[in-house]
Image (cartoon, grey):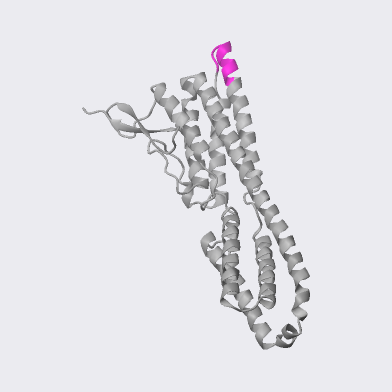
């Protein structure tokens, strides 16, 4: 069930709730008719009220926890993107010796985007490891190796004067802050709710609808209202289940901050006149087009005509 699309899971929930009510109608007409005629089902009002109240509280807490998870994860990504920009700026301040590390940092940023948001498009001017086809652990290892090369490159810098000594120290300090932000992001919870809890919640809802079927008369108006109630709860469960994986679906975490960070790196490269040309020969002329976010600029390259 965890791998099903959220919309399909919501339809299954709707079907289960309606099926629970139908079974209750059948039981009441075939097996419990004597009790319904004597009015014994009137005592179920208190039980139904109790179940509805408890379930409403649980769903409210569930929605609040899910929103808190999304907000916290979005804040982690904003901090992470900010650290990427600061590290790139520190490397840029050092000079041309740090350009290989800057290109590796751009590759890391692009790979991180496609690792979490696999449908996103990256500018063709950026080369990066193809982590889309790798498992989660393999992709993490590839990105960790890339960052390790950046760290070793910073350590190997050979400052020629006191100014560059301070700039090299700043690069290493920014790298440590960036690494701390990365591990904070990786070790944070990667989904908002465990699947077994959601299954248990669906079971609670089914029990409530069974009670509705036992208590309510089987006429078209009541059936219509029960179907509408099931549809409302199913749509609510769709929203909750869609956020279980925060990088897919309608209510996913935005990759805007990471695209802005990559766009800032590419703009800085072009401003310095160090943008690499993907084609052999010819001069690389930067062309700016409004691309993958409103604020960031997608940088592509075309060959200068001979």
**Is residue 166 highlighted in magenta?**
yes
User: Which residue shows up at 31% across the image and 27% down it?
Assistant: 285
Q: Quadrant of residue 201?
A: bottom right
Task: Give coordinates of residue 143: x percent, y percent.
Answer: 54, 41
Residue 108 visible, this orientation: no
Residue 237 visible, this orientation: yes
Q: Is residue 90 above or below residue 195?
A: above
Q: Is residue 175 above or below residue 250?
A: above
Which of these two is toward me, 254 or 232?
A: 232
**Is residue 251 highlighted in magenta?**
no
Task: Give coordinates of residue 116: x percent, y percent.
Answer: 53, 46
Quadrant housing the N terminus: bottom right
Horizontal side of residue 242 vs 263, given as left or right: right
User: Which residue shows up at 31% across the image and 34% down it?
Assistant: 279
Q: Main secondary structure of the magenta part?
A: helix
Task: Give coordinates of residue 150: x percent, y percent.
Answer: 54, 32
Which of these two is toward me, 259 or 249?
A: 249
Q: Quadrant of residue 28?
A: bottom right
Which of these two is toward me, 200 or 46?
A: 46
> Magenta region: which residues?
159-168
The residue furthest left is 306
């Amino acid at each position: 069930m965890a791998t099903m699309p959220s919309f399909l899971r919501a339809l299954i929930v709707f079907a289960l709730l309606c099926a629970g009510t139908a079974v209750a109608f059948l039981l009441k007409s075939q097996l419990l008719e004597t009790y319904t005629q004597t009015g014994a089902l009137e005592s179920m009002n208190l039980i139904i009220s109790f179940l509805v109240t408890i379930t409403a509280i649980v769903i409210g807490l569930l929605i609040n926890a899910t929103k808190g998870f999304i907000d916290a994860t979005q804040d982690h990504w904003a901090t992470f993107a900010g650290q990427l920009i600061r590290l790139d700026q520190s490397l840029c301040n050092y000079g041309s010796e740090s350009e290989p590390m800057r290109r590796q940092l751009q590759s890391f940023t692009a790979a991180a985007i496609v690792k979490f948001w696999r449908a996103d498009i990256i500018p063709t001017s950026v080369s990066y490891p193809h982590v889309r086809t790798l498992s989660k652990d393999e992709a993490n290892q590839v990105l960790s190796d890339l960052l390790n090369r950046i760290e070793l490159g910073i350590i190997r810098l050979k400052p020629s004067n006191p100014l560059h000594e301070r700039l090299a120290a700043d690069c290493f300090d920014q790298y440590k802050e960036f690494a701390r932000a990365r591990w904070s992001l990786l070790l944070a919870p990667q989904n908002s709710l465990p699947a077994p809890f959601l299954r248990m919640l669906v079971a609670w809802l089914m029990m409530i609808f069974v009670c509705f079927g036992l208590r309510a008369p089987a006429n078209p108006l009541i059936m219509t209202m029960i179907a509408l109630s099931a549809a409302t709860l199913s749509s609510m469960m769709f929203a909750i289940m869609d956020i279980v994986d925060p990088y897919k679906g309608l209510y996913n975490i935005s990759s805007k901050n990471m695209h802005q960070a990559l766009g800032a790196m590419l703009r800085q490269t072009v401003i310095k006149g160090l943008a690499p040309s993907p084609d052999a020969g010819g001069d690389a002329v930067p062309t700016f087009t409004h691309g993958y976010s409103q604020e960031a600029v997608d940088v592509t390259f075309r060959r200068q005509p001979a």
